[in-house]
Image (tube, rainbow, N blue to C red):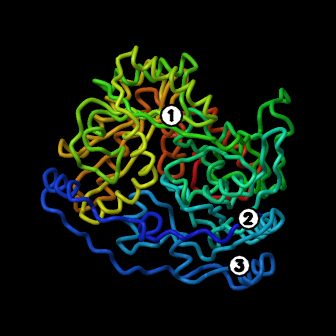
Amino acid sequence: MTPGDAREMHPHRWGDPAAAAALPDAARALVELAFGAAETPAVEEFALPEPTLAEEVVAELRAVVGDEHVLADDDIRRRRTRGKSTPDLLKARAGDFADAPDVVVRPATHDQVQAVLDLAVARRVAVVPFGGGTAVTGGLVALRDGFTGVISLDLGRMKGVRDIDPVSMTATLEPGLRGPEAEALLGEHGLTLGHFPQSFEYASIGGFAATRSSGQSSAGYGRFDAMVVALTAATPSGRLDLGTAPATAAGPDLRQLLLGSEGTLGVITSVTVRVRALPATTAYDGWRWPTFGEGATAMRTLAQSGLLPTVLRLSDETETALNLARPESIGGAGDGGCLMVAGYEGTRAAVDARRAAVSAALEDLGGVPLGEEPGTAWVRGRFHAPYLRDSMLDVGVLVETLETATFWSSLERVYAAVREALTGSLGDQAIVLCHISHVYETGASLYFTVAVKQGEDPLAQWRAAKTAATDAMVDAGATITHHHAVGTDHRPWLAREVGPVGVQILRAVKASLDPAGVLNPGVLIP
């Protein structure tokens, strides 16, 4: 059960440029109104650094995975440089590929991954595990200092379904499967994972696990880390097999060491995940709330009453006014208030019952029903926002996102603090939008989108804003990331979140599993 190779993403744009659309007239008018005449920054010619990896090491790698699976041409090295954050794209558009790996190595089995790691330790080579390349926090940039070279360990050949247990409702998946590939293979058995982050079309199963991904249907299906019941990883210290039962009291849950470890402790070579039956039907509704606060209160009430739909998201007043929940009509005039989208999946009876109960609760709380159209419009455009970012970068507008999570009692304070930090750094001209798309009984995430005219040094411009916003999150007691992961971008703040003893634990685990430090050096671990 192995599908063909997945599409490659463009080196300095998101996804497939053929799927992108020109900036809508309404959006272009908004850009010119807010930021002045649109400008088109030049995309510079690129230059790759010469590989530093010795030929004898390259020959040894070829002996492990086969000649055709060790690649060093300029195109593949360029496509394996960094991820898809706005700073990543700005560097690529400026022709900066200084972080390019020396070679791309494509193993097909756990044993080949293990052999590559053993060779990397012996030859002092840094290894960056690569899934779909959708990282947005610097998780694909390894420090070169002290290493003889850098390998991009591309897991794209490892994309099988190893096992399906229809009684326990689990599936064992290989890490290189992209989101659509996994859903297609599971769908052949009438199953779904139900994990649909915005990066779904290109992100991989291994990446979901390594970053604690959270999908747009998390209200109904849960976060990815909550789906994982077992995993296997190759580490420089040997093979690690974790997970023998759905629950255990056999000490600390060591699976959690690998989930969210971002390729720094081991390379995940398979995960066993909980799956569910393909939904027989789906339904989506739109709701309007007078204010973001009232909509958030309604979300909290649903979460704490056990009445969550499969999808639940709420845009603040600015995001609603700009129609960001509907990227194909961005910039169009909204109708005021805040838009909520509620989605339901399951059997017809289950969907009808949950939809009726949720709708009654929302009406009792003061929500105004808008019918199905706003929800179905969101579904049509749910994976399109990154393409819109490209179109905005094309006309000289810096667009980037950042996210956090906090307890319900702190939500309003964190929301205000981050918005104030962003506008304080970028100026009042900056447009700051926010939505809630992941909710729990005890709290929720806040996902911010920022747009501002690019300055002379847009990298420094965003770095200052990101620093101010993250400081505000930490000062307000919120997490530095809910689902984007730590990477290199959030690493300076991790010690403040986990404390000095937490840092000692992370370093001790790193020293035990990767004593030579070859796995993704400079990422995650303070």
Q: Which residue is mark 3?
A: 69
Q: Which residue is mark 2?
A: 158
Hey, which quadrant is residue 257 in on the image? top right
Percent across and percent down for residue 309 are: 54, 29
User: What's the residue type where badge 3 is placed?
Assistant: His
The answer to whether residue 424 of the structure is visible from this angle is no
Q: Are marks 2 and 1 in contact (CB under 8 Å)?
A: no
Q: Residues within 10 Å of mark 2 (few under 14, many from 20)?
A: many
Percent across and percent down for residue 480 are: 48, 38
Percent across and percent down for residue 482 are: 52, 38
Numbered tag placed on residue 95 in the rendering: none
The one of 282 and 461 positioned closer to us in this rendering: 282
At mark 3, the secondary structure is: helix
The answer to whether residue 498 of the structure is visible from this angle is yes
Could you tell me how far apart the alpha carbons at marks 2 and 3 are, in whole angstroms?
12 Å
Could you tell me how far apart the alpha carbons at marks 1 and 3 are, in whole angstroms?
39 Å
The one of 154 and 322 positioned closer to us in this rendering: 322
Residue that sits furthest to the top in the current view: 364
Q: Which residue is mark 1?
A: 438
At mark 1, the secondary structure is: loop
